[in-house]
Structure formats: structure tokens, C-alpha cells
Amino acid sequence: MLKRVKRRYLALEIDSKEPISSSELMDAVWNAVGKLYGEYGASQTGLKMIDYDAERRFLVVRATHTAVEMVRTALASITRIGNKPVAIHVLAVSGTIKALYKKIKP
């Protein structure tokens, strides 16, 4: 019998002066994970974009619960997307999207 995959949702803030498209952003995240952990490691993360607000520079991604630290490490290693300087900050991590939005709303 297969075990259900536990997931975690990460709320991220994109610190950049220039606009970044969602595809550029996810490519950079995947490249960072791939560079640090290889293809096998990247496949273990179950990484998926859930929500991206380019105006607020806010991103929500989903990962497996066992890979949260891998994803956080990979995000910390991103300093440039294209030739735009970027920093990505983890605002919150939660088991459900609803709880995640509750944590980050003032």
C-alpha cells in the first residue's frame, strides 16, 4: 500500500528591484535544487509553484515535507536570476495553504 505524501507550503518573498516572470523564477529554483542535489535530489522535492504575485513579489511553492530543508537551502543559494540581483526569503512554512495565508496575513 502506498503512503500518502505529506506536503509543505512555503511562502516566499522575492527581494529584487526588477520584475521577474514566474517562469524565470521557477527555472532559477529548479536550477538551484539541481545544482545542489542533482537530478535525483530534485525529483525528491516534489517542487511545484502554487501562487505567484509579481506585483507584491510573493511566491508560494509546494514541496514534500522531507525536502523542505533542501528547498530552503537551494533558495538561499539563489543570488541572481538572469543578470538581475535577487534574494529569496522564506516568510512561513505550513502544512496547508489556508494556514500558510493565515500566518502571513497581518
Image: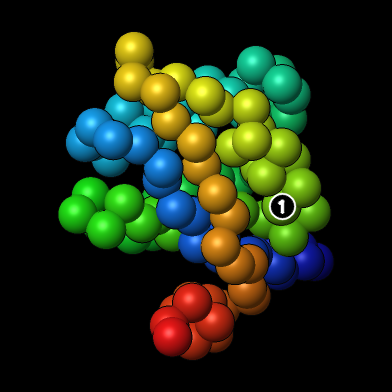
21 over 105 or under it: above or below = above
> Which amino acid, mark 1?
Val
40 over 83 or under it: above or below = below
Q: Quadrant of residue 59?
A: bottom left
Q: Is residue 3 left or right of residue 79?
A: right
Q: Is residue 100 left or right of residue 40?
A: left
Residue 58 in view here: yes
- Closer to us: 2 or 7: 7
- Closer to us: 62 or 57: 57
- Residue occupying image coordinates x 50% and y 62%: 11
- Residue occupying image coordinates x 67% and y 55%: 64
- Residue occupying image coordinates x 40% and y 23%: 85
Mark 1 Cα within 10 Å, few/some/many (few <14, many 20+)? many
1 over 46 or under it: above or below = below
State which quarter of the image contains the N terminus: bottom right
Query: Which residue matches tag 1?
Result: 68
* Residue 46 point in image, percent of width and height: 59, 46
* Residue 102 point in image, percent of width and height: 49, 86
Residue 23 in view here: no
Q: Is residue 25 left or right of residue 74?
A: left
- Closer to us: 27 or 43: 27
State which quarter of the image contains the C terminus: bottom left
* SS of the residue under disc 1: helix
